[in-house]
Amino acid sequence: MKKLFIAIVASIFSFSAMAGGHAEWWKKAGAPYAGTVLQGVAENTPPGQFAGEVLAKQFEELTGIKVQLENTSWDSMYDKAIKDMEANSGIYDFVYIEQDIVYDYLNRDFLVNITEGLANNPDLQAPGVSLDDFTTFIDYFKDGSGDVFGVPMEAFIKVYLYRKDLFEAADAKAAFRAQYGYGLSPATSFDQYRDNAEFFTHYCADNGMECWGTTVQGHTGHPASTYEFLESIGPSFGLYNWGVNMDTYQSCVENGGQLNGGRAKAALNFWTQLLPFAPPEALQSTWSEVGASFAAGRAAQGWVYGENAAWIATDAEKSAVVGNVGVMLPPTAPGVMTQAAAGNGYIGYFDGGAYGIPHSSKNIEATMLWLQFIAQNEVQADWAIAGGRITHKATYADPKVMAVDEQADGYFTLMRDTGFLYAGAPPFPFHGAGRAAIDPFIYKALAGEMTPEAALDGACEALDKVMGDLGYQG
Amino acid sequence: MFSNNRTGWLLLSPTILILILVGLVPFFYVLYVGFFKWNPLAVDPSMQFEGFGYNYRQLIFDEVFLSSIWRSIRFAVVTLFFELSLGFLLALSLLSSFPLKSFFRGVHTLPLVIAPIVVGSIFKLFTVQGLGPLPHFLKDFFGYTLNYGLNADQAFWMIVIMDIWHWTPFVTLTLLAGLSALPQDPYESAKIDGANNFQIFIYITIPMMVPVLIVVIFIRLMDSLKIVDEVWMLTGGGPGYATRFTGIHIWKEVFEKRFYGFGSAMSILYLYITIVICWLLYSVMVSRGKSEN
C-alpha cells in the first residue's frame, strides 16, 4: 500500500514536472483530440529513440493522443517522408527534418508554418513553451521572415574523440617520442593526426589489441563518406559550402569554385591516406558504424558525430571505452579557426534535426501540441542525457546534464562554448541531387580507383552539371 | 453462351480493374513523365516538355547508365549460369534417395522464404570487414583479404554469390517438379538400347525439360535484371560504380537526384531492353526446340 502511494505521488510529480506544472492545461488541450494517433517518421538516433519510447508515452498519458514514431534508417526515413509529402498522402503527421534538407523542404512548400499556426490558434499555445528558449540552432528551421517550420529535437557538433587511456599510456608516450621526436598528444594539426594514426595502428598490433589509429567514415556505397568529406574534413581544411561559389553556383576552380582547389585536394589526400590506419570496416562504415567502432575500442581517435559522443563516453552497457574518452575540437588548417571565429568559415558540421508537420498531415492541431510538448524546457535534461543532444539554452545549466558533461570530458560545454565555430549544411535546395552527383567520385577516391585530384576534378564537373541542369547558374 | 461469357467477364472484372490500376496506369504515367524535363529541386520545378526524344537522346550518351545496363546483363548471365547448373544438379540429386533427404530439402529451401533486404543484411553481417566471420576465416586460413568496400571485383562476385544462395533453391524446386513429372517410357527404352547415364541426360532429360527450363530462365533472368534490395543493403552500389546495377542507378537518379523525367525515361528504356532480351532468348530457345523435335 505504501509502495502504491509512493508510486502515485511520484507519478503525479513526474506528470507535473514533464508538463511544466501545467498538466491540467495539457489534459484540456488534448481532450478534443483524445484517441488520435499521430504517425511520425525519423532517423533512428538515440534522441529519436527517446522521443518515441519515453516522450511519446508521457504525452499520451497526459493528453490521450497516441504518438507512433517510426525510427528507421536515414535512407528509409527520407524515402518514406519525401514520398508521403510529394504524394500528399497524409500518412505522416510529423517528419524528421535534418538540417541539410530543410532548404529543399521549404523550397517545395512541404511544411506547415508552425509560428503562424500557433498564432492563429491561441488555444493551442502551451503555457511555458517558448521558441525563444531554443539555442540559435532553431534559426536553421526558419524562413526569411523568421517563422519556424521545424521544432529542433537534436543538435550536435562533430567533435574529435580520442582514447585517453591510449594517449596517456607511459609506454606509448615513450615509443611515440622515440619514433617521431615530439610528445604524444591529441591532434591539433593534420600532420600530428596522421602520426597518431600511424603510431597507434602499430602500437595496437604490437600489443595484441584489436584497435587502429583512426576512424574513417568511408563507406564506398553510402553518402556518409561524402558527408564526412564535405562537412568535416573539407571545412577543417578551409573548404566551405562544398566549394560552391554561392554567387554563381559553380564549383570548379576554373569557374570560380573551390571543390577541386588546393584545399579540397589536400583534404581528400589527407583523408584517403588515413585508410591504412583505420579499422578494416572503415570502407563499409557510415556514421553509425563509426560510433560503434569507437565505442568498441577499435580506434584511438577520430571525427565522431556528437549524437554518439555522449553515449560512447558514458553508457557502459554499450561502450567499452567509458571513462577513457577525451573530447576536443578537431584539428584545423592554419587560418581556418580565425575565419570560423569571424563568421567567414566553419570548422565542421553543426548537425541536427527538427520535427516538422507536412501540409498533408490530417492531424495538424494535435501534432502542434506534440511538438510543443517536446519543446518544453522540463523534458530537455533527460533527453540530453539519453541522446547527447541539446537544443535549449537552459539545458546546459541543468545539474543532471552538467554531471554527464563531466563524465563526457566536457562535450556539452564544448558544444556550448564553440558551437559558433560550426555550421550546418549550405542552403542548397538541390542538396540531395548535388551530393548524389559527388558521391561516386568520393567512393572511387576511397577505393583507390581514382586519385583524389582526379576524383575532385570529376566531382566538380558533375556537380556543376547538376546545378546547371537545375537552372541555378543563371 | 453470352450469359456464360458475361459471368466470366464479371468474375474477371475485379482482376482486370486492379491490373489496370496498378499496372497500366502507372506504366502510362511513367511513359508520359519520361517525355518531360522535370526535377522538383530545379529553379523551375514544373514539368517542361522539350520534345519527345529529349530524355532518350541524353540517355544514349549517358555512360553511367549504359555501363549499368552492361553490368546488369553480365550479372544476370553469370547468376543464371550458376543457378541453373547448380539447381539442375541439386534437383537431380533430390530425385534419388539418400539419408536426411527431407531435412536437406527443407534447409535448402529456407533462403527462398527470406526477404531480399534481409538476405542483404545477413550477408553484410557475415562478410563485413573487421566484424563479419567470413573475412576473418578467409584471412586466417587462406591468407585472402576480403574487402568488397575496396575491391570492385570482390563486390560484384559477392553479389553474385548472394544471389546464387538466395535463388538456387527456386531453380532446384522448379526443376525437381519438372523432373518428377517426366514420363518414364523414354528412359526405359534408352536403357534397353544401352544408353549410358550421360547420354540419357543429354538426349532425353534435357530435351524433355526444355519447357520447364524456359520458364525458369525467364523468371530468373527478369528477376536478376531487376535486382536492387540485396545490393542496396550489401554495397549500396559501390565501391564507385562497381555494383551499381540499373535498378540502383534508376533509384539514385529518381529518389536522390529527383530527376523524375530522366529517371522515367531510363525505366522505360530499361524495360524495353529487358523485353528485347527476353524475346530474343525466347525466339532462340523455341526455334532450337522446334528444330530438335
Image: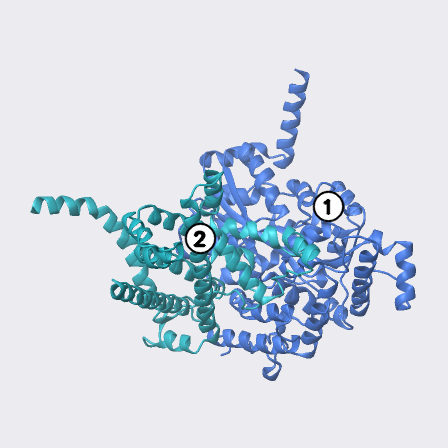
Up/down of B237 relative to A369, above or below: below
Dot 1 falls on which chain?
Answer: A
Q: Nearer the viewer, residue A59 or B175?
A: B175
The residue depicted at 65 percent of the width and 54 percent of the height is A289
**Image check: A55 left or right of B276?**
right
Q: Dot 2 lies on which element?
A: helix
Q: Residues within 10 Å of mark 2 (few under 14, many from 20)?
A: some
Chain A, which colour? blue
Vertical position of residue B265 compared to residue B193: above or below: below
x, y percent for residue B181 = 31, 46
Please tell me whether mark 1 sits on a helix, a strand or a loop.
loop
- Left or right: residue A106 versus residue B179 is right
View extreme (top): residue: A1
Res. A343 in view: no
Q: Label 2 belongs to which residue?
A: B89
Disc 2 residue type?
A: Leu
- Horizontal placement of A54 versus A465: left or right? right
Q: Position of residue A453 (x, y in %)?
A: 65, 78
Q: Is B186 or A470 nearer to us in this picture?
A: B186
**Quarter of the image where one finds residue A339:** bottom right
Q: Which residue is mark 1?
A: A319
Quick one: quadrant of the N terminus of chain A? top right
Q: Nearer the viewer, residue A328 or B59?
A: B59
Q: Residues within 10 Å of mark 1 (few under 14, many from 20)?
A: some
Mark whose residue sits in front, 2 or 1: 2
The chain that appears cyan in the image is B
Residue type at mark 1? Ser
The label on residue B201 is none
